[in-house]
């Protein structure tokens, strides 16, 4: 089983690690289990609890696009950001 692709039968409100989503998927942030400095940095570059974003690249780094900004995250960081996949 490929754990990098979200199973299509999962309910849309289930939070999963960002690192588990596949390229091209859209999601919104549910929770970040990160230290305060890193959370502040992510907020500063536009990744907030209300952010919707698209996965541009999976792996290490994981690249996401929030509005017009692309952000590269290490796999370790992406695995501690929990997101809810969206249809948009």
Image (cartoon, grey):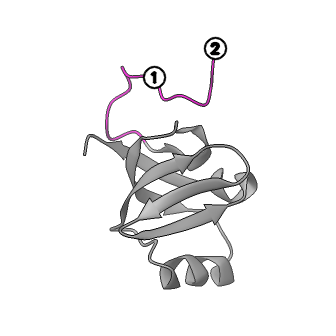
Kindly identify which residue carries mark 2: 1
Q: Residue furthest top?
A: 1
Q: Residue at x 37, y 47 (%)?
A: 26
Residue 20 in percent (x, y) is at: 58, 38
Q: Is residue 2 magenta?
A: yes
Left or right of 78 on screen, residue 70: left
Q: Which residues are magenta?
A: 1-14
Residue 33 in percent (x, y) is at: 62, 63
Magenta: main secondary structure: loop
Left or right of 33 on screen, residue 25: left
Kindly identify which residue carries mark 1: 7
Q: Is residue 35 above or below residue 87?
A: below
Q: Residue at x 42, y 57 (%)?
A: 30
Q: Which mark is residue 39?
A: none
Q: Is residue 88 above or below residue 71?
A: above
Q: Residue at x 39, y 58 (%)?
A: 53
Marks 2/1: CA–CA distance: 10 Å
- Tell me the SS state at disc 1: loop
N-term-proximal mark, 2 vs 1: 2
Number of numbered discs: 2
Viewer-closest of 35 and 23: 23
Q: Quadrant of residue 12?
A: top left
Q: Residue at x 45, y 61 (%)?
A: 65
């Amino acid at each position: 089983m490929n754990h990098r692709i979200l199973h299509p039968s999962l309910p849309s409100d289930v939070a999963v690690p960002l690192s588990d989503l596949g390229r091209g998927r859209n999601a919104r942030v549910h929770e970040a289990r990160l230290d305060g400095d890193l959370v502040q940095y992510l907020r500063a570059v536009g990744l907030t609890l209300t952010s919707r974003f698209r996965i541009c690249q999976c792996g290490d780094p994981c690249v996401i696009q929030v509005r017009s900004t692309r952000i590269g995250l290490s796999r370790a960081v992406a695995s501690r950001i929990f997101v809810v996949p969206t249809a948009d």
